[in-house]
Amino acid sequence: MKTYPNNITFSVVIEKDKDGYVAECRELQGCYADGTTYEEVLENIKNVISLQLEDRVERGDFSLETFTENNSISLTTLSLPIPNHVS
């Protein structure tokens, strides 16, 4: 019998915009949240992820085994030269 950890790790992208912050969890389609502060958007995206997981488990279309095997999102950074026309 395969055992799983008690927690699942998700990547969350948080961006600042003119109204505050926007967060997205790309592993779970449709998981977006916003907030006026960083702390608020982080709490909001946690709630959205939890609700989506609960809903998917209740519908029977979420398998922890399938999710952990297919989780192939990675996070990296790139450094590129600034184009000449930018001042």
Image: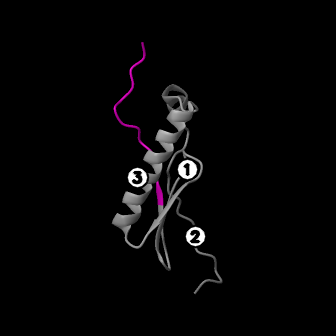
Which mark is in front, 3 or 2? Answer: 3
The location of residue 55, given as percent across then percent down, is 51, 41
Q: Taken as a whole, is the magenta stretch helix, strand or loop?
A: loop
The location of residue 39, given as percent across then percent down, is 34, 65
Residue 69 versus residue 78: which sits nearer the camera? 69
Name the quarter where the C terminus is drawn: bottom right
Q: Which mark is residue 81?
A: 2
Up-down: is 77 above or below 4? below
Disc 2 and disc 1 in contact, CB within 8 angstroms: no
Alpha carbon of mark 1 to alpha carbon of mark 3: how far?
13 Å
The stretch in magenta equals: 1-13
Count residues near mark 1 (Cα–Cα under 10 Å), then give few for <14, some for 14-19, many for 20+.
some
Q: Amino acid at mark 1?
A: Arg
Q: Residue furthest top?
A: 1
SS state under label 1: loop
Residue drawn at (48%, 78%), measured in percent from left and top?
19
Mark 1, residue position: 26
Who comes first in sequence, dot 2 or dot 1? 1
Residue drawn at (52%, 63%), measured in percent from left and top?
79
Q: Amino acid at mark 3?
A: Lys
